[in-house]
């Protein structure tokens, strides 16, 4: 039976016109004339039997039906583009995985280990895009997500299942020069002394320092003070340049610690509320390739935890 699918060119024109709400700007983007875009939209509306745009004094605006169809069309076109890129790269035999990942964990922990997965599965390609917060898998073309969060956050992520990879322990780190400036001569210091040093904050964890000082039974009025950064990678860079003390998972700053750019300012780790998870859509038909990757990832995580 013939599929009820409109011509691709009409969808491409509609997607551009919907994003800009302008036939003129859509024409400029697609290197077409305005009349050509208008004809394509007219063809699509005739095919669907639905008005997608309405005329306004300033041009055109999406109708309610047009806005809903535009969201669906954009997702489908993006998926088709990804499939085409995979095919052009000759990635058909082993398949591919698309992962969303928190940035610093992806660059500092996952990337150094992916070579091992590539050796086991040389025909498989792993695509990675960064995401710092939960999203709806139904609205994204990801197979899975590598996420750092609390058990409650993961439990409340609708339509998903989560595989615990590892627990997160955080410890204060800073540059050796900062310890010397505060007259500690490169040696680890007591928690009370940390409270008097400049603190670096992570914006997604505003209570991190408060929790650490509470665990040490230290009164720290400035526990929430200091500059805030969203990503651990920026936090690590700021600490390396002597801007303050950062509360970091040691596995994410292993290289800086090994090179001496950072030192543990106070060797009292705190088992944080957050863990690292592999989050997947809650579907019964999980892809065999994703199951294979999940098993490999869990093995790497357990090996790393054992090394600590």
Image (tube, rainbow, N blue to C red):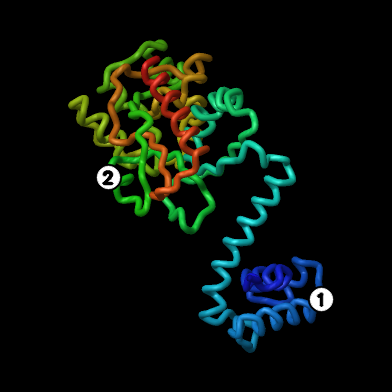
The dot on residue 152 is: 2
Q: Nearer the viewer, residue 235 or 115?
A: 115
Please tell me which residue is depicted at 62% across the width and 69% down the height of the picture: 19
Answer whether residue 177 is visible to the viewer in this image. no
Q: Is residue 22 above or below residue 118?
A: below
Q: Which residue is mark 1?
A: 33
Residue 129 place in picture, x, y as percent: 55, 44
In the orientation shown, which residue stands out farthest toward the left? Answer: 217
Q: How far apart in space, not on screen, are marks 1 and 2 (Cα)? A: 53 Å
Q: Nearer the viewer, residue 93 or 142?
A: 93
Locate residue 12: give its quadrant: bottom right
* First-in-chain label (1 vs 2): 1
Label 2 sits on a secondary structure element that is helix
Please tell me which residue is depicted at 68% across the width and 45% down the height of the picture: 86
Tell me whether circle 1 and circle 2 mark residues in contact (CB < 8 Å): no
Q: Nearer the viewer, residue 165 or 281?
A: 281
Crowding at dot 1, Cα within 10 Å, few <14 / some 14-19 / many 20+, comes out as: some
The dot on residue 269 is: none
Locate residue 178: give its quadrant: top left
Answer whether residue 195 is visible to the viewer in this image. yes
Residue 186 place in picture, x, y as percent: 41, 12
Residue 107 place in picture, x, y as percent: 54, 32
């Amino acid at each position: 039976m013939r599929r009820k699918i409109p011509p691709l060119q009409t969808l491409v024109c509609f997607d551009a016109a919907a994003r800009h709400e302008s036939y003129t700007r859509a024409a400029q983007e697609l290197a077409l004339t305005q009349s050509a875009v208008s004809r394509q939209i007219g063809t699509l509306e005739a095919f669907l039997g639905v008005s997608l745009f309405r005329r306004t004094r300033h041009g055109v605006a999406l109708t309610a039906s047009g806005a809903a169809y535009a969201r669906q069309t954009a997702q489908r076109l993006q998926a088709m583009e990804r499939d085409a890129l995979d095919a052009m790269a000759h990635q058909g035999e082993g398949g591919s995985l698309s992962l969303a990942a928190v940035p610093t964990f992806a660059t500092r922990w996952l990337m150094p280990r992916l070579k091992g997965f590539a050796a086991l599965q040389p025909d498989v390609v792993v695509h990675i895009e960064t995401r710092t917060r939960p999203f709806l898998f139904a609205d994204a073309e990801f197979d899975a997500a590598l996420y750092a969060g609390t058990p409650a956050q993961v439990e409340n992520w609708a339509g998903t299942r989560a595989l615990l990879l590892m627990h997160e322990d955080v410890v204060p780190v800073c540059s050796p020069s900062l310890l010397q400036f505060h007259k500690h001569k490169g040696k680890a210091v007591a928690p009370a002394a940390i409270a008097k040093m400049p603190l670096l904050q992570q914006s997604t964890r505003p209570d991190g320092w408060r929790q650490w000082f509470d665990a040490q039974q230290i009164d720290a009025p400035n526990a929430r003070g200091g500059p805030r950064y969203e990503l651990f990678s920026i936090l690590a860079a700021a600490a390396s340049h002597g801007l303050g003390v950062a509360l970091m998972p040691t596995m994410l700053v292993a290289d800086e610690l090994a090179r001496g750019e950072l030192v543990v300012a106070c060797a009292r780790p705190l088992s944080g509320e957050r863990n690292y998870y592999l989050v997947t859509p809650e579907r019964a038909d999980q892809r065999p390739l994703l199951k294979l990757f999940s098993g490999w990832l869990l093995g790497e995580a357990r090996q790393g935890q054992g090394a600590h």
